[in-house]
Amino acid sequence: MARTESNMLPLGTKAPDFKLVDTVDDKIKSLQELKGTTGTLVMFICNHCPFVIHVSSQLSQLAKDYISKGIKCIAISSNDVDNYPQDAPHLMKKNAIDNAYIFPYLYDQTQEVAKAYDAACTPDFFLFDDKLELVYAGQLDDSRPGNSIPVTGKDIRAAMDALINNETVNPNQKPSMGCNIKWK
């Protein structure tokens, strides 16, 4: 399993807009229609990465815990499905249903959205405020497959809680780590 760190997009960066297909309902969705009133968490994930599989139940729980607080979650897969067919859109839909994702799971076929976000790995997390300005780019928590640290989402949760409470998000952020995005 390859370990790749996120690129740490500069804080304050405006969220790049997008329109992508939601693999669950086959409809085109835009950032503007999916964003939250308080914040928006954009997550680059995929179906087969052991790092994503390790945290997938926490991703579902995050969405459930924060949607009522005005933070919406959006998942995007940008992997090359020709070489990684397990990440194909029809399997993304199955994965979303199996993992009880209550957030859209979008397919970035051209990989342009991943490039616009400077996403590097799965999972890669970007939390934006109500103005779609980046306030957090980093890890979910310190848990990794095989390190015996429980998956809690503490780092992302601290950033989301600060956003909800109109507090400054801690600028000392650790990069996420996972499998590299499978580029074409």
Image (tube, rainbow, N blue to C red):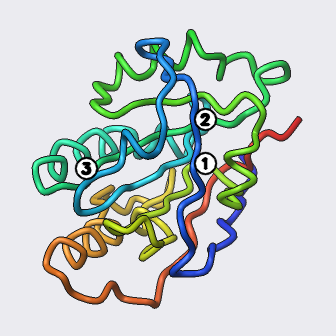
Q: Amino acid at mark 3?
A: Leu
The vertical placement of 20 against 33, above or below, is above
Residue 122: image tag: 1
Q: CA distance from mark 2 to mark 1?
A: 9 Å
Where disc 3 sits, the SS reads helix
Residue 77: image tag: 2
* Disc on the earlier residue, 3 or 1: 3
Marks 3 and 1 close (CB-CB < 8 Å): no
* Disc on the earlier residue, 2 or 1: 2
Residue 180 located left or right of residue 184: left
Residue 81 located left or right of residue 14: right
Q: Which residue is mark 3?
A: 62
Q: CA distance from mark 2 to mark 3?
A: 18 Å
Q: CA distance from mark 3 to mark 1?
A: 17 Å
Q: Amino acid at mark 1?
A: Thr
Whole-percent x, y for residue 170 in the image: 36, 88
Residue 153: image tag: none
**Front-most of residues 46 and 26:** 26
The vertical placement of 173 against 118, above or below, is below
Q: Amino acid at mark 2?
A: Ser
**Front-most of residues 111 and 170:** 111
The vertical placement of 173 against 18, above or below, is below
Residue 6 located left or right of residue 137: right
Residue 37 located left or right of residue 35: left
The vertical placement of 17 against 82, above or below, is below
Residue depicted at 63% across the width and 74% down the height: 8
Where disc 1 sits, the SS reads strand
Name the mark nearer the viewer: 2 or 1: 2
Whole-percent x, y for residue 41 in the image: 39, 55
Whole-percent x, y for residue 86 in the image: 66, 18
Where disc 2 sits, the SS reads strand
